[in-house]
Image (cartoon, rainbow, N blue to C red):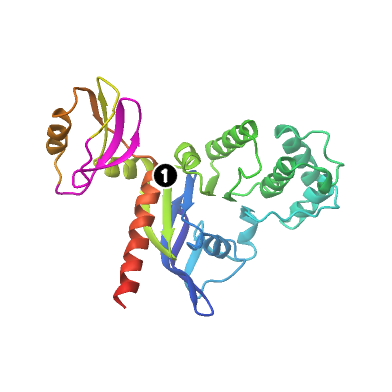
């Protein structure tokens, strides 16, 4: 059974359709990647899930309940645009945000000290936000998101402002929360983070769904067309034939590539290489989510451009 269910939601601002009949489901206890280029409709979708704005049509339910002000208390939202009060002390700010989610002040204070210590921010509780570094402010923002112990966490670019050590710490916390049964929606442009953390993804562009499913299954599908080949010497003048392959990476004595189209057979490619090199290693590979993202968004953008030109 789906924990979060989004059914045929749309949203138009004046003459711009930001979200166009999107549907998807998120099971309980997973990390779900909500992906797309700038202007794809991710933030609008997230705001509708949070009941910040209402869809023009469609329905959103959390644990079989339609999203309303009461259900909002089961959601924790970390927006990309941070919203802390610069002149407030950290502890006062955290208690205040928790009160907005119906958490008593004493419980909020206890939880705040727990999370400050967990995130390596112990001793900063009486500092004003404006006295903290960007990374430390980000920790406070994250704590304010989880302080009411939400069942659904929506994290929009949560690693922004973090150095590699703090990024790794937050990744581990996200996985801990998943193990505890929390459901996490992660929105980020860093595909390597998506590969590390997400069980399922939804890719949207121009307000529409263009790809969704389990990460491992998606990579297997696209992996049918991706290969790695290694030669016995340095690649100097590698013959080019755009009708056969598209090269992704070229190194000292190896390349990663995909077949140019569905009509090309891998035997044709191998015959092409054997004429010029001795092959020492050859294998089929899985593409990265970054490569899949670029490929799918690029296809949609090209299609839209062709439609505009036809007009």
Q: x, y percentage for residue 97?
A: 75, 54
In this rendering, is residue 38 above or below 55? Answer: above
Q: Is residue 1 visible?
A: no
Is 310 placed left or right of 267 in the picture? right
Is 247 placed left or right of 133 in the picture? left
Circle 1 packing at 10 Å, graded few (<14), some (14-19), many (20+), is some
Q: x, y percentage for residue 31?
A: 49, 44
Q: x, y percentage for residue 297?
A: 38, 56
> What's the residue at 53%, 41% (across, down)?
181
Q: Is residue 260 visible?
A: yes
Q: x, y percentage for residue 299?
A: 33, 58
Work out whether residue 195 or residue 93 is closer to the camera in this orientation and state it. 195
Is 27 placed left or right of 103 in the picture? left
> What's the residue at 62%, 54% (across, down)?
80
Residue 7 is covered by the magenta coloring: no
Work out whether residue 277 or residue 2 is closer to the camera in this orientation and state it. 277
> What's the residue at 25%, 33% (across, down)?
238
Residue at the front extreme, as displayed:
237
Work out whether residue 116 or residue 264 is closer to the camera in this orientation and state it. 264
> What's the residue at 32%, 78% (across, down)?
311
Work out whether residue 298 or residue 3 is closer to the camera in this orientation and state it. 298
Q: Which residue is mark 1?
A: 290
Which structural element holds mark 1?
Answer: helix
The residue stretch that appears in magenta: 239-263
């Amino acid at each position: 059974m789906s924990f979060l269910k989004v059914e045929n939601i749309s949203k138009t601002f004046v003459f711009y359709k930001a979200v166009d009949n999107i549907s998807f489901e998120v099971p309980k206890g997973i990390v779900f990647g909500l992906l797309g280029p700038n202007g794809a409709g991710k933030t609008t979708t997230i705001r509708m899930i949070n009941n910040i704005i209402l869809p023009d049509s469609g329905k959103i339910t959390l644990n079989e309940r339609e999203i309303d002000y009461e259900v909002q208390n089961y959601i924790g939202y970390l927006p990309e645009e941070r919203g802390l009060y610069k002149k407030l002390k950290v502890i006062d700010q955290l208690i205040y945000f928790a009160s907005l989610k119906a958490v008593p002040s004493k419980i909020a204070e206890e939880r705040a000290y727990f999370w400050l210590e967990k995130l390596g921010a112990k001793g900063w509780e009486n500092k004003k936000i404006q006295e903290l570094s960007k990374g430390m402010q980000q920790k406070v923002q994250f704590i304010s998101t989880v302080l009411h112990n939400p069942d659904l966490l929506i994290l929009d670019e949560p690693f922004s402002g973090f150095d590699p050590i703090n990024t790794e710490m937050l990744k581990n916390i996200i996985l801990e929360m998943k193990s505890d049964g929390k459901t996490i929606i992660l929105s980020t442009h860093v595909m390597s983070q998506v590969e590390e953390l997400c069980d399922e993804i939804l890719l949207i562009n121009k307000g529409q769904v263009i790809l969704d499913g389990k990460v491992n299954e998606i990579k297997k599908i696209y992996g049918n067309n991706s290969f790695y080949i290694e030669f016995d010497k340095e690649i100097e003048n590698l013959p080019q034939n755009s009708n056969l392959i598209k090269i992704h990476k070229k190194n000292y004595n190896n390349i990663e590539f995909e077949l140019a189209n569905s009509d090309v057979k891998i035997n044709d490619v191998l015959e092409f290489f054997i004429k010029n090199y001795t092959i020492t290693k050859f294998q089929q590979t899985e593409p990265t989510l970054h490569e899949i993202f670029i490929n799918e968004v690029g296809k949609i953008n090209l299609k839209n451009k062709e439609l505009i030109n036809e007009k």
